[in-house]
Amino acid sequence: MHTLIDPAILFFVFGVFAGLIKSNLEIPAPISRFLSLYLLMALGLKGGFALAQSGLTAQVATGLGLAVALAVVVPVVSYLLLSRFIPRFDAAAVAATYGSVSAVTFITATAHLDAQGIAYGGHMAAAMALMESPAIILAVLMANALRRSQAAAPVAVRVAGGGTLALGGGQGGAGFSLSKVLHESFTDGAQLLLLGAMAVGLLAGEAGQQAMKPFAGDLFKGMLAFFLLDMGLSAARNLPGLRSQPPLLIAYGLLAPPVHAGVALLLAQAAGLPLGDTVLLMVLAASASYIAVPAVVRYAIPEANPSLYVGLSLGLTFPLNILLGISGYTQVAAWVLG
């Protein structure tokens, strides 16, 4: 219950309530964008300052390696599972969504660990940035393979006399540019800001940390609460769309996060990661993207249904992780690691 009485989480709950009763409360889009950029910049600075103190160690390399491994394994396994039950383009989009990460969920988790007095490595912010792109790239490659198989498949055309004529398939995916998708994946402004702020923090060191403390420290919690209010309103808008989703996908949206978190816990335990890094790795594995991935997938996989992957991630998985997941993962990790 400690997480639920945290002011930032309570503002998220209030935002969901305001959205469900159809209040006209609204955070203007430019302010919402500013808040997200502020949180990423502050998180990057804090991570850079922490890295300046700890340095680049074997533990840092291990944490980053596990993050990249999860970013590859999760979307591949998710696609193989989901493609058995839903259209394969939809499966690729959902796999990308759940294989990527949610920055807001991660930022909320760092605030939770700070409140609990649990230390974590600043490099975990870099782990979050590294985990964003692999799932997008894999989904794009999957979709391209699907289009090629459809284009190569013969099309039966009925001809006079009752017979059929096999013709080559359509061209599928015309106008698609893989290079454009890759460029957007690696040069996304939010991701660049996070990494740039981390580099600034790493170079500035302790003196820079003291100078930026009012910006990156004192304001952080209040800004996070304001942004979670906006996210609560967004989550409430996506909840009604879940009613039209198949029960299997609802089950996936509920069960996939703890399963992915469990895999991350096992890997972190085997690698000997400390508690704080383990919790953040679990949170990253359990989260689902609702901003970066949908923005790219809508262009790269137009055959997929946006209401499906956005509705699941923002309407179901995001609230689940914010309200119950972060505190639950922390308790489980503390119990397993002793």
Image: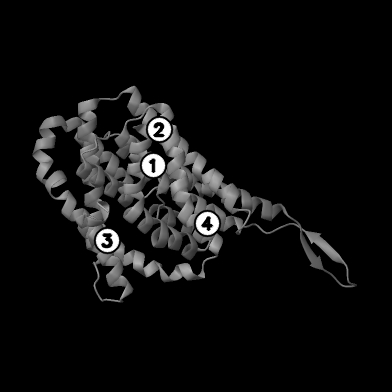
N-terminal label among 2 and 4: 2
Q: Residue at x 55, y 58 (%)?
A: 90
Where residue 215 sits: x, y (%)? 13, 46
Residue nearest the viewer, comparing 44 with 5: 5
The residue singled out by tag 2 in the image is: 268
Residue nearest the viewer, comparing 48 with 108: 108
Q: Residue at x 22, y 32 (%)?
A: 50
The CA distance from mark 2 to mark 3 is: 30 Å
N-terminal label among 1 and 2: 2
Check disc 3 and give the amino acid type: Phe
Check disc 2 and give the amino acid type: Ala
Check disc 1 and give the amino acid type: Met
N-terminal label among 2 and 3: 3
N-terminal label among 1 and 4: 1
Q: Farthest residue toward the right?
A: 161
Check disc 4 and give the amino acid type: Ile
| Vertical arrangement, residue 263 with respect to residue 244, above or below | above
